[in-house]
Image (cartoon, coloured by chain):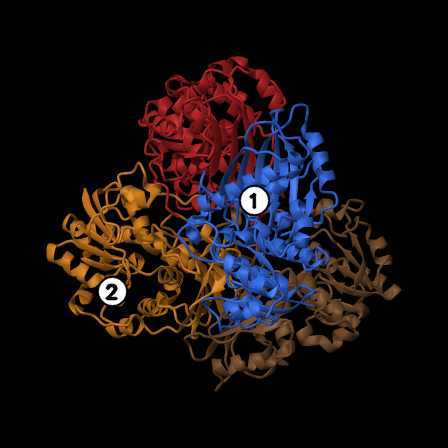
Chain colours: A brown, B blue, C red, D orange
């Protein structure tokens, strides 16, 4: 049994991670930390966890000290010191913030997040934790950067086309739609029920921090720079991200060939489901699960395919993928603790 | 490993039951039947179940023949013949319809459902499957009538007060609010999104078929007839039932005493959580789980307590309770396959 | 043309009132004030009002100075001084807070709102602005206390029975359900989309400040004290209040007679619609209008009737009723500016 | 006062049109017809219209005979005969179906709707009723084809760029999101609340009938063929369409210049609001109004602008635009009966 800690357990991703780890058959002790609510019962903060084994909240230091695996679900800027503490004691560290997602590309990180690296060596040793892309490296990693929710969803839709050379020239448009849990726990005007119910709104057009992360992923997948345009929208639902991707096809490639290629590409992946012709990816069918559904469609324009991909932003887009990364890094069965099937409704 | 069948697997309760049984560690083969879609893949009907072990839909006879435990999730009127088939082969039968819920009280069943019993002996042998009320009898039963969703939620709120003699004279008002999945799979005007979103509506006031089931439960709990008024409402959400119960208190009983009594009464129940003072039962905290949350409140009128109870109508109100009943009847751990914690959001 | 001011125009009720007054055919100049956003364009704060005649926000003093009619939509505690300023200049004052709702009953106000009256004479001169109850007095008033949203909805359901002596002994249970706009503009945990979507929650049971206002209304209607229990719930929708009222009937009174009595009682009221047998009041049918729908139902218990009443909490429950009160007090047609029919969806 | 008829008054667009015309100051008699419900009271079918002047439903022939202006809100295939009847009696005909939207381009209509024209002369005489594009022709028309909801929203976003030569080469991607009322009144699986709540789903990718209508509009605006890709999505809300348009810019054109050009282009339009930099079009701010909001944004890619446009699909996307067309064709004030401001929430 593995002992785990969640630093920042009372944020939304942290709380979801707690829920998953409490049901993980290989996880023993689970230390939950909160900077602001240490000393309180987790089940008092999250009454959904009453009658579970969720423990009293402790300090970050206590949580790290007790654990072989440390997850951090904090705003950016906190992960380097936690990574250092984990390295010092030999713990596996899986970070859900953006701090390690840009690897050695400090300049991009600094450009979008406002400060550079204090410990560049830690970044050099880290791995970007998209299992479908980096599984072998994750298996050997001690610092894993858990991907952003939008980058996970968009990248998985486009990976086969980019890796297999089926994408043509021209920018890929990624029109992304997210449920409101993606905005986190803090009440704001934009997430106040009367402001976001019964409406759909684009936000941070041309300025969302997941754009450079997506660009890095697409380049890594294609082996070359790939132009992309990313536009996120807020949808009145709790869970889920849908990416509608408009992909220029390489000359001679049609949608049917792309669909088959995607299905073959992901045939052995446990958490990616390429839908047969006639079905369309929707967030409904992946909610509360670690699945990513991908469907491939005609656009009415022979040169462009439309790919739809859907994930649960809190699971494959955050906590579930973190568990998947832990499983890989520890040599456990990759789907351990992630077997819950998505409900139909 | 137990072999199970679900007759009527493509309705909402059937599909939810399939999801739960596919994740149940003691369930082996799972036969799914559908009268109208036999031959199709379950995952084609319910794409959320893609990449699961959900099998091709078969006929009712095939499903029953293959299984030691048979669940039926059909409209009322079909269960007697299934029960007879199960009895003939020695299978445990758990029925999610109303057909067996009234036990030997054929006249009440006939008054509300329009026809009497063809096989009264089966009814005499059946048990009403509310575990908190009838656990010992369920353990020996071969025919279990799984309770209705509203009756489960309302009855669990009121059971301690009625059993312990803390309820006074006067009718108990049960104002119940349900998510839309309770109306089932069939599209109707009332469940058409534009008709039920952004609105709340009472329905079937004074005429809902769960009223006599509630009355029977309250009488069984109190050991005497108990007057009650039941008013259901449709709420624009998918999952959950909230019952707000206005309970006349027995002379000398106050809300504090009732709250303590409820907590003690359910202290050893795995799926009932009596909330501490200051917390209020909401459907949010029980969604996708088998929990029933109960909270006890002042009404501002010394003679009346308000009890709020919340369940997921598809889990504790249907499929989850059916699994719980199977576990009890088979001597398995009562919570086996029901360990998923409710998500916070 | 009448010149109007809204003090507190950027809160939800104030903004709704601005929208209604901008479309009122008898309203000329409309001054909008905000303590925190004076100087900004109203249409910058509320972009829905772009291309309307909504003016730049001014200070409270400027707004009052410019206007013959002053509405205040502020938290409680601010209305006495505004009322005094209006009295000094002879302006009609319509207050949407609780400050004047309790008339000369200072002790009840103090018990629920924490402080007494500084200017008792103003309260003695004020009228509780429920037109169906106090129309004649409103017509002569210079200070009108606009009723609370829940009290409006609950009181209109019960008024005929109480006034006509059709109510029996025993407490009336009022189970009330509100959309989230009722909680106002300020983002909070309870109104954060992920916390209130897909859930229904009771709140402030036995402790909501509208309970004493309801009690005062029921007593005024019946001419005697009337016991009532009030339990509010938060529903995942923006607009609307539904009250489900459980009314003990006087001996010999049945539901059919009560329904007829309600219909006759309100026959000449422009904004109360008593539904025929077979229809049920829902919030859907009154949204964005000043209507209150009332329906009368059997409970399954001969001694108790169920009345359902529905309003739009922001219109008949706040801004619309304020306009109605202005119309009455100024001798305008009572429905002027309130003719918008509710949309079906 | 003008006498009007609505053929197909009980569908969603028809019912919304009834609501608008009942509040129109220049409309006198309003005849409502329904093929299936003739003889019933409109207020029995739509209880939101109780206490309005909505009349009893009559037959199509009666409705047309009584009226100077005839609106039809029927499935495609019915409008030619209604148009002929109107022409015979000299009535203005405004059709909300697709039957007249393709003008003399019978082949496109036939390709997408399955049959050609029976009365080509009527089509030659008809005008496509997008007032911002065809106002002068609408003023003289006797047959107006009211545009589709998606084409209205998408076309208004792109009109300035196309007309002014600011669009570059390459396909325009139009990612469109619609509320569920767009699917009409008939309950279906896709619009069953539990199937569409808490989810977002693309549909009819590459195959939606509004694609050729959009293409025709863009060509008319640009004066040349314009490549476009249209992808609609279903969003869990009742009202509204948001189009997110990815527009290749002509060489040397930047987003700032495009924004200014859009604002100037629409400066005199009463129902198009080009938002200032920093604001984003959302469906919230146009609900229940005839406004179209447009905002212009950087994409992060210098060659592409993102335009967001929002309408209420039932108003500017259907019934409101029909009223606007009537006003123009009759020489009334263009905004008559359309003055209701959108609510903030």
**In the orientation shown, which residue stands out farthest toward the bottom?**
A252
Q: Nearer the viewer, residue B296 or B262?
A: B262
Q: Quadrant of residue C230?
A: top right
For the residue carrying disc 1, how many other residues have a C-alpha within 10 Å: few (<14), some (14-19), or many (20+)? many
Is residue A175 shown left or right of residue B259?
A: left
Q: Chain of mark 1?
A: B
Quadrant position of the N terminus of chain D in the picture: top left
Q: Nearer the viewer, residue B189 or D196?
A: B189
On residue B151, the disc is: 1
Residue A209 seen by the camera: no
Residue visible at 46% across and 49% down in the picture: B116
Q: Nearer the viewer, residue B232 or B286?
A: B232
Residue visible at 67% across and 76% down in the picture: A133
For the residue carrying disc 2, how many other residues have a C-alpha within 10 Å: few (<14), some (14-19), or many (20+)? some
Q: Which residue is mark 2?
A: D77
Residue visible at 71% across and 75% down in the picture: A135
Is residue A105 shown left or right of residue B102?
A: right
Residue D312 seen by the camera: yes
Where is residue C216 drawn, in percent x and y? 51, 20
Query: Measured along the vertical axis of the image, is residue B218 above or below residue D286?
Result: above
Query: Measured along the vertical axis of the image, is residue B90 above or below residue C215?
Result: below
Residue visible at 37% across and 48% down in the picture: D289
Q: Quadrant of residue B315?
A: bottom right
Q: Secondary structure at mark 2?
A: loop
**In the orientation shown, which residue stands out farthest toward the right?**
A89
Q: CA distance from mark 1 to mark 2?
A: 50 Å
Q: Secondary structure at mark 1?
A: helix
Q: Chain of mark 2?
A: D
**In the orientation shown, which residue stands out farthest toward the front?**
B121
């Amino acid at each position: 049994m593995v002992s785990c800690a969640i630093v920042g357990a009372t944020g939304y991703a942290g709380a979801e991670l707690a829920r998953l780890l409490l049901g993980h058959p290989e996880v023993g002790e689970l230390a939950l930390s909160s900077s602001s609510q240490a000393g309180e019962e987790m089940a008092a903060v999250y009454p959904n966890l009453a009658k579970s084994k969720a423990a009293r909240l402790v300090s970050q230091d206590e949580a790290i000290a007790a654990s072989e695996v440390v997850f951090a679900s904090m705003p950016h800027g906190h992960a380097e010191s936690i990574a250092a503490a984990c390295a010092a004691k030999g713990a596996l560290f899986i970070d859900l913030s953006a701090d390690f997602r840009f690897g050695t590309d400090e300049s991009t990180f600094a450009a979008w997040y406002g400060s550079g690296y204090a410990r560049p060596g830690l970044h050099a040793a880290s791995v970007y934790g998209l299992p479908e892309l980096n599984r072998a490296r994750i298996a050997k990693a001690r610092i894993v950067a858990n991907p952003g929710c939008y980058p996970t969803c968009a990248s998985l839709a486009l990976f086969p086309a980019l890796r297999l050379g089926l994408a043509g020239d021209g920018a890929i448009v990624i029109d992304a739609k997210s449920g409101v849990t993606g905005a986190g726990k803090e009440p704001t005007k934009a997430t106040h029920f009367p402001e976001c119910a019964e409406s759909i709104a684009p936000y941070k057009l041309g300025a969302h921090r997941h754009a450079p992360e997506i660009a890095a992923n697409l380049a890594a997948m294609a082996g070359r720079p790939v132009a992309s345009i990313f536009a996120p929208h807020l949808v009145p639902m709790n869970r889920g991200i849908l990416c509608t991707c408009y992909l220029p096809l390489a000359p001679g490639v049609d949608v049917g060939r792309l669909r088959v290629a995607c299905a073959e590409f992901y045939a052995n992946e446990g958490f990616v489901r390429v839908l047969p012709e006639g079905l369309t990816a929707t967030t409904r069918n992946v909610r509360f699960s670690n699945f990513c559904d991908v469907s491939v469609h005609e656009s009415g324009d022979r040169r462009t395919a439309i790919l739809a991909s859907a994930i649960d932003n809190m699971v494959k887009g955050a906590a579930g993928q973190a568990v998947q990364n832990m499983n890989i890094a520890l040599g456990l069965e990759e789907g351990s603790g992630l077997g819950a099937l998505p409900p139909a409704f």
